[in-house]
């Protein structure tokens, strides 16, 4: 098994574990750190996490399948999350989602995250992002965008290099 | 004239106000903490000696503060329930999961004034003999978590957190813990499970009341971001003074998140109960009304879980007259004072104080379909009525919004929704997913029936038979 966690990240993880009286509490934070680095959660990452925290791999696997932010597949370099929920729908998020999908050659009616064949973009409808007053909103990786018109969306996509 | 009253939001939108410690200190920051830590044991009128933490808890009780996270439960009472005799550590968790659709108030505090939250949290921890606390922030707020971590580092360097805070001998460790995109982590016992590194499966109460058996089976306090900020102001002003803000039993101020079809969506802080729902939507100082040529159709008054209000609906509520006696009054929906009790009297709730406005262009069936899709996606799946019911409702609504509905679907939806809440599930998500369905279908039944009937007529005209799925949906035993 060649799963190497860079020492800098492992040091960060070791520090995170000290935040909790019980190691298991750190699991979600450890998975975040690994996903941020590797881009997804592989079976090896789960085994590594389990070993690190003294857990069984199933204890980690059940988190990866429960929490929507974790994904087992590789996703695009740029992950575009469009808010699907009511205030954003009233503000035009379905049009925005359709526009983005159209632009990137994806099917707006397909369920779940979709990635372009070149692996550059993933588009996903997500639930309320807690910025309903500036609908419609979307995220591009960790960046957050408000009042996203189709024009603004195109600018965001154009900046993804 | 109705207007904002900015207590929590006082500084954060001022030009030049930044989220760093220096700026916070320049604006009188951490003075309330100093005041709290300087309190000496005091003797009350009836001869009891109260420790400093006990005095702080008494101020919070006096203030009448009610939780700003959703349930509106008395904060003083919640703190009094904490088991202080178990000999176990007491934990405090700040609920910064902010994920009730329509709500975006905690985000403002976290991003623009993180030290205000820290100050409220440190005081609340001191008041409850807490030495280890967490801020559970939703995973999508990447920057929010960084801002909070930066604020914690700053506070530590200035001796405001960590060991021997400001030389008082009081120690508090505080860590930021990130969620990973599940709404149910906002429910306090789900949040605790999540913080223990498990799936966020809410715990059954009794016996798992956080005040007794919370994090690591120890007494635990879970409070919303805004609630903790209010504690800072209660300590600064005194509980009795704070209680003069707002209205009786609905004291203080509250941040309202306003979204949907209004000209000026945004967050507005008001004295609780001093402004009506209609003023929040139509007044120039708030929502500024609807767009040109539109009329009001419906309002969700307290986050997507709250029962919808229909334009023109009337309610009987009790209002305190000038002689101090309660008189029953008929009020129109827009004239409801925006507070915990008035909305409860109108059969709904102020919940997370998120108002979603829908004008006459709204397809009400599509709006409910959108909400139900959310709940179907977010049910944790532990309880059969919630897991299956939320999916059935979403499925029926998907049919209705995709040209495959039936006239009976309205009754079918109501029937499912009626069988989920009322103690049949582990947590209040059961209520949260059924209340929108019950209220939308009851109040706009004609639209649901008309849509289903139109689909049926179309199918009859084109000779397309109902699919087996539709037949199941219509079968009476469900
Ligand atoms: C399904 C569900 C979701 C919830 N989501 C949140 C949330 O995102 N933020 C929050 O502060 N409270 C949320 N709550 C309420 C919490 O369970 C809890 O009552 C609250 O954090 C207590 O804090 P407070 O007393 O200061 O309001 C939710 C409750 C339920 C049933
Ligand atoms: S009511 Fe729903 S969300 Fe709550 S515990 Fe049961 S299945 Fe989970
Ligand atoms: S509905 Fe889109 S951010 Fe809340």
Image: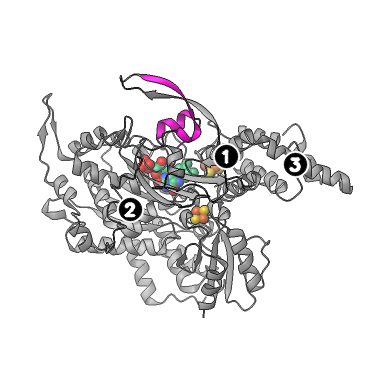
Does label 2 lie on the same chain as label 1?
yes
Subunit ID for the residue under disc 2: B
Q: Which residue is mark 3?
A: B452
Within the magenta stretch, is there residue B328? yes
Q: Nearer the viewer, mark 1 or mark 2?
A: 1
Tell me how far mark 3 sits from mark 1, CA to CA: 19 Å
> Can you name the residue that lies furthest to the right here?
B463
**Residue drawn where x is 76% and y is 32% of the image:** B476
Provide the secondary structure element on which disc 2 rests.
strand
Question: Which comes sooner in the sequence, label 3 or label 1?
Answer: 1
Instruction: Describe the element under mark 3 as helix, strand or loop.
Output: helix
x, y percentage for residue B470?
78, 43
Report crowding for label 3: few under 14, some 14 to 19, many 20 or more residues within 10 A (C-alpha): many
Q: Nearer the viewer, residue A122 or B16?
A: B16
Query: B221 and B355: which one is in front?
Result: B355
Vertical side of B212 occupied by B4: above or below: below
Q: Which residue is mark 2?
A: B134
Answer yes or no: is residue B187 visible.
no
Marks 3 and 1 share the same chain: yes
**First-in-chain label (3 vs 2):** 2
Chain ID for label 3? Answer: B
Query: Can residue B22 be spotted in the picture?
Result: yes
Q: Is residue B199 magenta?
A: no
Vertical placement of B64 versus A20: above or below?
above
Q: Circle 1: is it few (<14), some (14-19), or many (20+) Cα within 10 Å?
A: many
């Amino acid at each position: 098994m060649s799963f190497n966690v860079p020492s800098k990240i492992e040091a960060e993880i070791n520090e995170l574990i000290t935040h909790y009286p019980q190691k298991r509490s750190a699991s979600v934070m450890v998975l975040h750190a690994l996903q941020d680095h590797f881009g997804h959660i592989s079976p090896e990452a789960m085994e590594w996490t389990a070993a690190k925290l003294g857990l069984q791999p199933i204890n980690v696997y059940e988190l990866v399948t429960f929490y929507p932010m974790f994904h087992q597949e590789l996703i695009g370099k740029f992950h575009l999350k469009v808010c699907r929920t009511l205030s954003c729908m009233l503000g035009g998020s379905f049009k925005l989602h359709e526009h983005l999908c159209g632009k990137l050659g994806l099917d707006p009616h397909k369920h779940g995250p979709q990635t372009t064949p070149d692996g550059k973009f993933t588009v996903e409808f997500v639930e309320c992002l807690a910025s309903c007053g500036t609908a419609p909103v979307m995220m591009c990786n960790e960046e957050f965008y408000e009042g996203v018109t189709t024009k603004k969306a195109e600018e965001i996509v154009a900046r993804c290099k | 004239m109705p207007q904002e009253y900015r207590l929590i939001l006082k500084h954060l939108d001022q030009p030049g106000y930044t989220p760093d410690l220096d700026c916070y200190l320049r604006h009188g920051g951490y003075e309330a903490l100093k005041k709290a830590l300087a309190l000496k044991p005091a003797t009350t009128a009836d001869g009891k000696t109260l420790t400093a933490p006990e005095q702080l808890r008494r101020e919070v009780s006096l203030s009448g503060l009610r939780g700003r996270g959703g349930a509106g439960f008395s904060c003083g009472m919640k703190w009094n329930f904490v088991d202080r005799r178990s000999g176990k550590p007491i934990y405090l968790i700040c609920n910064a999961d902010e994920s009730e659709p329509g709500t975006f108030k905690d985000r403002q505090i976290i991003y623009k004034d993180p030290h205000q939250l820290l100050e409220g949290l440190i005081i609340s921890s001191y008041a409850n003999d807490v030495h280890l606390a967490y801020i559970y922030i939703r995973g999508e707020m990447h920057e929010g978590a960084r801002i909070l971590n930066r604020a914690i580092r700053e506070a530590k360097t200035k001796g405001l957190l960590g060991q021997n805070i400001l030389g008082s001998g009081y120690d508090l460790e505080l860590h930021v813990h990130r969620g990973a995109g599940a709404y149910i982590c906002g429910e306090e016992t789900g949040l605790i499970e999540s913080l223990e590194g498990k799936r966020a499966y809410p715990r059954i109460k009794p016996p798992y009341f956080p005040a007794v058996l919370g994090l690591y089976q120890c007494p635990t306090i879970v409070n919303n971001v805004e609630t903790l900020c209010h504690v800072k102001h209660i300590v600064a002003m005194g509980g009795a003074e704070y209680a003069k803000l707002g209205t009786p039993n609905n004291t203080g101020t509250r941040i309202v998140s306003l979204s949907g079809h209004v000209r000026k969506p945004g967050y507005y802080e008001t004295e609780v109960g001093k402004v009506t729902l209609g003023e929040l939507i139509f007044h120039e100082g708030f929502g500024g009304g609807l767009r040109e040529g539109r009329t009001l159709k419906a309002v969700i008054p307290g986050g997507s879980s709250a029962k919808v209000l229909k334009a023109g609906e009337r309610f009987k509520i009790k209002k305190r007259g000038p002689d101090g006696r309660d008189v029953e009054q008929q009020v129109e929906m827009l004239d409801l004072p925006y507070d915990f009790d008035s909305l409860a009297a109108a059969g709904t709730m102020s919940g997370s104080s998120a108002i979603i406005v829908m004008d006459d262009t709204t397809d009400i069936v599509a709006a409910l379909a959108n909400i139900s899709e959310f709940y179907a996606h977010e049910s944790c799946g532990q309880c059969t009525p919630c897991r299956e019911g939320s999916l059935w409702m979403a499925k029926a609504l998907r049919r209705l919004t995709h040209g495959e509905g039936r006239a009976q679907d309205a009754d079918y939806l109501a029937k499912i929704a009626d069988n989920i809440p009322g103690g049949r599930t582990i947590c209040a998500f059961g209520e949260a997913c059924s209340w929108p369905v019950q209220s939308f279908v009851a109040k706009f039944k004609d639209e649901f029936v008309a849509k289903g009937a139109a689909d049926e007529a179309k199918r009859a005209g084109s000779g397309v038979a109902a699919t087996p799925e539709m037949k199941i949906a219509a079968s009476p035993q469900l």
